[in-house]
Image (cartoon, grey):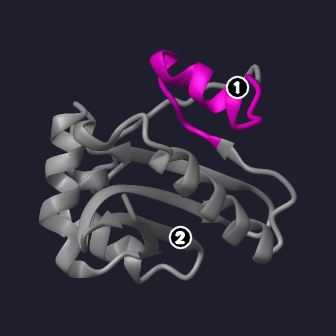
Amino acid sequence: MEMQIRRFKESDIDCLIKILKLNDQYKYPTIDGPRAMRRVANCESAVSLVAEVEEQPCGFVRAVYDGSRALIHLLSIHPDYQNRGIGSALIDAVCAELFRRGAPTVSATITEQSVSFWEKKGFRRTPAFLVLKELRKTC
C-alpha cells in the first residue's frame, strides 16, 4: 500500500465528511463541515493534511499554530485503513510542519478511547481538558 500525504483540497470535502461520519466524529457540522473545511483551508495559521491511497483520501489531520501554542484539533482515518500506520504518518507530518513554523510543543484534542495511540506517539496527558460553547450573534 503506497500512501501519500498532501495538503487538503476542496475536492476532498465529500470523502472527508464520509470518513468523519464513519468514525462518529461528525457531531458538529458547523466546526467540521464543508464551510468549516473551506475556512480552515484559507486560514494561514491552520494546517490541514490528507493521506491518500490510490489517489483516494483515506484520512486527514487538522491543526493550528497561533505563534505560541500548536494544537491538533482532529485526526480521522477511514475504518478500512486504520491500524496501517496512516494516523502515525499524519501525526508525524503535521508535527513536522508545526515545528517548521516554530511551534515548541503540540497538544491534541482526543477521546478517552484514543489515549494509547497518542501516548505511543509521545504525547502525555495534561490536567487541562476541552470545553465547548457554540457562539451565536450574542454571547
Residue drawn at x 22%, y 71% is 12
Image side of residue 27 versus residue 14, left or right: right
Residue drawn at x 80%, y 62% is 68
Image side of residue 71 versus residue 102, left or right: left
Where in the figure is residue 97, as x and y percent of width and height?
68, 71
The span picked out in magenta is: 108-125
Asked which secondary structure carries label 1, the reply is loop
- Residue 98 sits above or below residue 129 on the image: below
Q: Residue furthest top?
A: 112
Label 1 belongs to which residue? 128
Q: Nearer the viewer, residue 96 or 69?
A: 96
Where in the figure is residue 9, as x and y percent of width and height?
30, 80
Query: Residue 109 magenta-drawn?
Result: yes
| Mark 2 crowdedness (10 Å alpha carbons): few <14, some 14-19, many ≥20 | many
Image side of residue 91 versus residue 133, left or right: right
- Residue 136 sits above or below residue 25 on the image: below
